[in-house]
Image: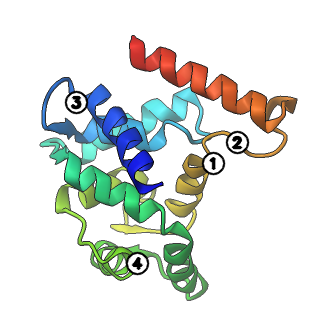
Amino acid sequence: MYNLQKESLEFEFHSHSMGSDTISAEEFARILIRHTSISSTEYKGYIDKLHMRLPAAPTIPFAEFLKFFQFLNTLDDFSLAMKMYTSAERPISLSEFRRAVKACTGHKLDASVLKTVFALFDENEDGCLSYQEFIQKMRERHCRGLQDGQHGANRGEVYRQCMTREIRSALV
């Protein structure tokens, strides 16, 4: 299963890298928020916010891209840590986020990935992430549009539509 996920992520990465060994922070952001429930207006707002907060946007190599998506596989464990902060009415800082990711995955995330995530999801610009600002969006992304009842269609039909759309967008 790991190899299948890695190949899928390699394909997604290379479809955005234009032959380079890295992708821009903007491309990373687009990949992250692609399968969330945000509207097209909000989508543009997220990208604009990223440009404002990271004027000298970092680039992200595939190895760091892969580490981040491996981290998303441990989202349930990470979510527990986030909920503890939330119940204490404390958002999580960048350094706490980094430590929690390392505890969940055994990997340290690169500063370029962390800065991009915080620039993208820190809605109130307090330098911290709350449960609502990050976990909720990543859970939506993890489901990739396969939640029950979406558009009144069954899961198989939603999956088929999603795959068709993804293949077409990759070929363009």
Q: Which residue is mark 4?
A: 104
Which element carries disc 4, helix, strand or loop? helix
Identify the image quadrant of residue 110.
bottom left
Q: Nearer the viewer, residue 119 or 61?
A: 61
Colouring chosen for the image of the structure: rainbow
Q: Which residue is mark 2?
A: 146
Q: Which residue is mark 3?
A: 17
Q: Are marks 2 and 4 in contact (CB under 8 Å)?
A: no
Which element carries disc 3, helix, strand or loop? helix
Which element carries disc 1, helix, strand or loop? helix
Q: Give coordinates of residue 152: x percent, y percent.
A: 87, 31
Tell me how many marks there are. Answer: 4
Looking at the rendered structure, the kind of residue marked 1 is Cys
Q: Is there any visible trace of residue 118 in the rendered image?
A: no
Q: Which residue is mark 1?
A: 143
Looking at the rendered structure, the kind of residue marked 3 is Ser
In the rendered image, the vertical position of residue 103 relative to residue 36, given as above or below: below
Looking at the rendered structure, the kind of residue marked 4 is Cys
In the rendered image, the vertical position of residue 55 relative to residue 82, given as above or below: above
Residue that lies at the very extreme toward the top in this rendered image: 172
Q: Are marks 1 and 2 in contact (CB under 8 Å)?
A: yes
Q: Give coordinates of residue 89: x percent, y percent.
A: 55, 83
Which element carries disc 2, helix, strand or loop? loop
Q: Earlier in the sequence, mark 3 or mark 2?
A: 3
Q: Using the numbered discs, state the Cα–Cα distance from disc 3 to disc 2 in whole angstroms.
A: 27 Å
